[in-house]
Image: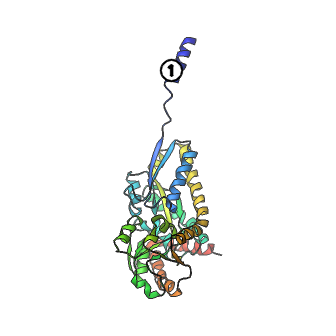
C-alpha cells in the first residue's frame, strides 16, 4: 500500500490537477476605455476577479468593437450574444421611458443632484431591465454635458448654425427647438461624422470629448450643464442565476464597489477633464451667454412634461422624491 501511495504521489507531480473551471462573461461598451463607462468596466472586471477568486472572468471591450452600440445593448444581452454590457441610458428610451430620466435637460445641476436622482431611479431602472430578462449591475455617472463647437457660441442665434450630434431623442428635440440641426448619433459613430463635415458640434461631457479627442475638430466647449446623465451596466438574468451562490455574492459586491468608486471618481473628473482639454488647446467658456441656456431651457420644460406623460405613474413619485431631496 505504501508503494502504491508513493506511485500515486509521483503521478500527481507529473500530471498536475485540472485547473478550476472558469466562467467568462463578454461585456462590451460603445465608449472608450478612458471614459467613465470604460472606467466602470475595468473596475468591475478587477473586483469580480478578486472577489470570485478568479472563478468568474469579465472580458470587457470598448469603442463598440463588439459591434454593439448602446441602443442595441439590452437586446444583445437578452439574446445571449453577450452576457453583460454597458449602455448609455438615454439611448434606451425606446425600450422604456424610464431610461430617459437621467438625461432630462436641466433637471440636475450638480453631482449631488445626480446622485440623488440615481438613487431614486434605481428601483425603476432595475424593474425595466427585469422586464427584458436582465439584471442591473451598477450605474455609471457622467460629468456634465456641454457643447463642443468649431466656433465660440456668443448669442442664442449661434445655435441655429450648429449641426450637432445629440445623444438621445430628448436632446435632439431640445436643440432642434432652439434652431439647431440636431441628430441623435451614437458615440461610436460621432468621429466619422466630424471627419466628413456632416456635423460641426457635439453634445457631450469633457469626459467623452477627451475619450474621442474631439479637440482635433472642435476647439470650443460651452459649459451649459445640460445634464449629468447615467450609463447602465446589466447582465442576462438567466446567466446570473446560473452562477453558484458564492459567485452571485461576488458579482453583487463587485457591482456595489464599482459604483461607489465611480461616484468618487466623478468628484474630481471635471477638473481633470478641463485640465486635459486646455492642454490640448480647448477654450472653455464656463459662463456662456445666458441667452444660450435660456433658448435651450425654453424647450426643457416641454420635454419634461412629455416624459411625464410617457412614463405614466412613475413620474410623480420620482420627481416629488427628487425635489424633496434637494436642500
Q: Quadrant of residue 201?
A: bottom left
3 left or right of 194?
right
Looking at the image, the residue that sits furthest to the right is 327
**Which of these two is toward me, 50 or 73?**
50
One can see residue 137 in this view: no
**Callout 1: 10 Å neighbours few (<14), some, many (20+)?**
few
Residue 75: where, in percent of width, then height? Answer: 38, 58
Q: Residue at x 56, y 15 (%)?
A: 6
- Is residue 130 among what the camera can see? yes
Does residue 45 sit above or below 300 in this rendering? above
Task: Indicate the quadrant containing the C terminus: top left, top right, bottom left or bottom right.
Answer: bottom right
What percent of the width, then of the height, locates residue 177? Answer: 41, 83
Position of the N terminus by quadrant: top right
Could you tell whether 230 is left or right of 161 in the image? right
The residue identified by callout 1 is 11
From what the image shows, is residue 280 above or below residue 13? below
Residue 156 at x, y percent in the picture: 46, 87
User: Quick one: 142 or 287, which is closer to the camera?
Assistant: 287
Give the residue at x 39% y 61%.
69
Image quadrant assignment for residue 175: bottom left
Image position of 99 (left or right of 1): left
Under circle 1, the secondary element is helix
Amino acid at each position: 500500500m505504501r508503494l502504491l501511495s508513493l506511485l500515486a504521489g509521483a503521478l500527481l507531480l507529473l500530471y498536475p490537477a485540472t485547473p478550476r473551471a472558469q466562467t467568462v462573461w463578454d461585456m462590451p461598451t460603445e465608449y472608450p476605455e478612458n471614459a467613465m463607462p470604460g472606467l466602470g468596466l475595468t473596475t468591475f472586471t478587477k473586483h469580480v476577479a478578486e472577489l470570485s477568486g478568479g472563478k468568474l472572468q469579465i472580458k470587457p471591450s470598448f469603442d463598440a468593437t463588439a459591434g454593439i452600440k448602446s441602443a442595441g445593448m439590452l437586446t444583445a444581452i437578452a439574446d445571449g450574444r453577450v452576457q453583460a454590457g454597458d449602455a448609455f441610458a438615454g439611448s434606451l428610451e425606446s425600450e422604456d421611458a424610464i431610461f430617459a430620466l437621467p438625461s432630462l435637460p436641466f433637471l440636475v445641476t450638480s453631482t449631488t443632484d445626480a446622485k440623488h436622482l440615481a438613487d431614486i431611479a434605481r428601483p425603476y431602472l432595475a424593474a425595466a431591465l427585469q422586464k427584458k430578462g436582465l439584471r442591473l449591475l451598477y450605474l455609471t455617472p457622467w460629468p456634465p454635458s456641454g457643447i463642443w463647437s468649431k466656433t465660440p457660441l456668443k448669442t442664442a442665434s449661434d445655435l441655429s448654425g450648429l449641426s450637432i450630434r445629440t445623444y438621445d431623442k430628448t436632446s435632439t428635440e431640445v436643440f432642434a427647438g432652439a434652431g439647431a440641426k440636431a441628430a441623435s448619433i451614437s458615440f461610436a459613430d460621432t468621429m466619422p461624422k466630424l471627419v466628413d463635415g456632416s456635423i460641426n458640434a457635439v453634445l457631450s461631457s469633457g469626459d467623452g470629448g477627451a475619450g474621442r479627442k474631439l479637440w482635433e475638430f472642435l476647439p470650443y466647449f460651452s459649459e451649459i450643464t445640460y445634464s449629468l446623465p447615467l450609463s447602465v451596466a446589466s447582465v442576462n438574468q438567466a446567466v446570473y442565476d446560473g452562477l453558484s451562490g458564492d459567485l452571485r455574492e461576488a458579482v453583487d459586491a463587485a457591482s456595489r464597489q464599482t459604483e461607489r468608486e465611480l461616484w468618487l471618481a466623478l468628484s474630481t473628473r471635471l477638473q481633470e477633464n478641463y485640465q486635459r482639454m486646455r492642454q490640448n488647446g480647448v477654450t472653455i467658456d464656463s459662463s456662456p451667454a445666458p441667452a444660450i441656456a435660456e433658448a435651450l431651457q425654453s424647450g426643457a420644460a416641454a420635454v419634461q412634461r412629455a416624459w411625464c406623460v410617457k412614463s405614466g405613474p412613475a413620474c410623480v413619485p420620482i420627481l416629488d422624491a427628487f425635489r424633496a431631496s434637494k436642500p
